[in-house]
């Protein structure tokens, strides 16, 4: 047997896509998450509210600490760029028109199934945001969602920030 007995099995990741999203739209994210060691299961979910109220383009339920560890590992140097490009691609992709449509523009949301904590990843995030994401200490957040504030140059939760003041 050639498999390493100490190797971790893939972590589960459930990728939820609005049913109105074009087929295959999630493929770049599935590929990026798979390269980070996740076993990805993509599922279409019915729209339960108007599309203009849809806060995310894709929701990924996965263990956030495992995700950040994989992203922060030395082996993931190229992979984090691959993930960044995948998020930018799905966040900007449209339905074949020259203008982005409401159905396909929005952030990708990572959600930890155990804690419910969410991290918002949008196509606007730069290299610095991903560098800081790799080093993010989840223990400092009790509520979400956690998003990158470009003006402050850091990841924050508005709720946690309000309680600190």
Image (spheres, rainbow, N blue to C red):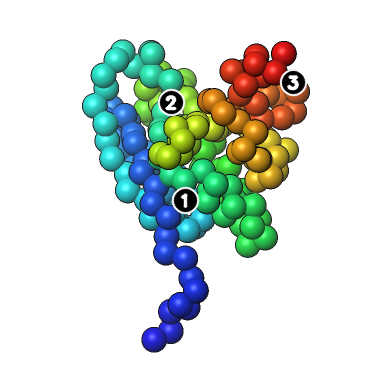
Is residue 90 visible in the rendered image? The answer is no
> From the viewer's perspective, is residue 4 above or below residue 102?
below
Return the disc, 1 or 2, that comes first in the chain's sequence. Answer: 1
Q: Nearer the viewer, residue 130 or 142?
A: 142
Judge left or right: residue 77 versus residue 4.
right
Circle 3: element type? loop
Query: Which residue does the image show at 71% across and 24% down from the upper left?
Result: 150
Say whether residue 141 is left or right of residue 45.
Answer: right
Q: Position of residue 126 (x, y in %)?
A: 67, 35
Residue, disc 3: 151
Q: Is residue 132 visible?
A: yes
75 relative to 157, above or below: below
Query: Which element is circle 1 on?
Result: helix
The outermost residue toward the right is 152
Between the residue at mark 3 and the residue at mark 1, the CA separation in whole angstroms equals 28 Å
Extreme bottom residue here?
A: 1
Residue located at (68% from left, 36% from top): 129
State the image coordinates of residue 27 (x, y, percent, origin top left): 39, 46
Quarter occupied by the C terminus: top right
Tell me which label, 2 or 3, sits earlier in the chain.
2
In the rendered image, residue 41, in percent from the top left (x then y), is placed at: 32, 48
Please give the count of numbered marks on the rendered protein.
Answer: 3
Q: Which image quarter: residue 19?
A: top left
The numbered dot on residue 33 is 1
- Image coordinates of residue 151 in percent, x first then y, are 74, 20
- Residue at 50% across, 31% down: 118
Q: Nearer the viewer, residue 164 or 85?
A: 164
Q: Which residue is mark 2?
A: 56
How many neighbours does mark 2 have within 10 angstroms: few (below 14), some (14-19), or many (20 or more)? Answer: many
């Amino acid at each position: 047997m050639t498999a390493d007995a100490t190797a971790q099995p893939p972590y589960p990741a459930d990728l939820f896509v609005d049913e109105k999203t074009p087929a295959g739209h999630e493929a770049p994210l599935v590929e990026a998450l798979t390269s980070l060691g996740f076993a990805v299961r993509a599922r279409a979910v019915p729209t339960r509210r108007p599309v203009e109220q849809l806060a995310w383009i894709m929701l990924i339920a996965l263990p956030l600490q495992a995700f950040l560890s994989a992203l922060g590992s030395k082996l993931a140097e190229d992979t984090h760029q691959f993930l960044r490009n995948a998020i930018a691609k799905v966040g900007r992709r449209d339905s074949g028109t020259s203008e982005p449509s409401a159905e396909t523009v929005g952030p990708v949301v990572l959600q930890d199934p155990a804690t419910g904590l969410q991290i918002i990843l949008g196509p606007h995030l730069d290299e610095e945001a991903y560098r800081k994401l790799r080093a993010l200490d989840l223990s400092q957040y009790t509520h979400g969602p956690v998003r990158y504030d470009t003006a402050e140059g850091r990841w924050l939760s508005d709720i946690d920030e309000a309680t600190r003041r």
